[in-house]
Image (cartoon, rainbow, N blue to C red):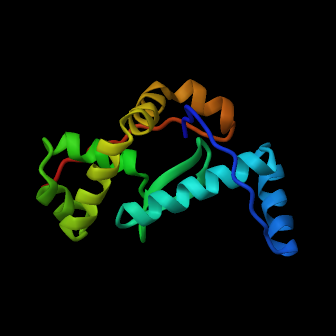
Amino acid sequence: MKQTRSIVLSMRLPAETGRRLKRIANRHGWTASDASARLVEEGLRRSEFAFLDFRDSPAGRQAYIQGSSLAVWEVLLLLRSYKENTKAVAQHLEWPETKVRAALHYAEAFPEEVEGAIVENSAADFDSLKRMLPQATEFAVKRTKRN
């Protein structure tokens, strides 16, 4: 999440909440201040956009559609393959169309974030995947003739 200008706000947290905040900050290599700013921003986005959730992924924290395993950028790729037809994507995913539109609205509000994830995904090839997952093997699907 890109920050331009910032303001300083002071807050009191219960001791256990502060410990939990420090644990999540340590896990991600953030300061407690960075962690709290990120979590507040995510909470604000959740309240502003329907069906939105944030999760850790191999690519970092990403916006996902609630109740699914799809990140917003993945829904956007589907939308592009269906020529922006939200109804067709909803049928493909067996979702209400409102969830697909929710992903589209988020992508419109945060285009750099979503486009960055799409570009990063496009840059991945089997060789880079193999370096991260040495057990990965390449395979080809064999087509069989039907009688």
| Residue 65 % position (x, y) | 40, 61
Compare residues 17 and 88 and report the one nearer the observer.
17
Q: Is residue 127 left or right of residue 53?
A: right
Residue 42, visible in the rendered structure: yes
Q: What residue sits 17% from the left and 64% below the top?
A: 91
Q: Is residue 33 left or right of residue 128?
A: right
**For the C terminus, which image quadrant?**
bottom left
Compare residues 14 and 27 and report the one nearer the observer.
14
Q: Quadrant of residue 39?
A: bottom right
Q: Is residue 42 above or below residue 121?
A: below
| Residue 76 % position (x, y) | 30, 45
Q: Quadrant of residue 55?
A: bottom right
| Residue 101 % position (x, y) | 23, 57
Number of marks drawn: 0
Q: Is residue 96 above or below residue 62?
A: below
**For the N terminus, which image quadrant?**
top right
Compare residues 81 and 53 and report the one nearer the observer.
53
Residue 69, visible in the rendered structure: no
Q: What residue sits 49% from the left and 60% below the top?
A: 44
Q: What residue sits 42% from the left and 71% below the top?
A: 67
Q: Is residue 69 left or right of residue 89?
A: right
| Residue 36 % position (x, y) | 70, 55
Compare residues 7 and 13 and report the one nearer the observer.
7
Q: What residue sits 74% from the left and 62% below the top?
A: 11
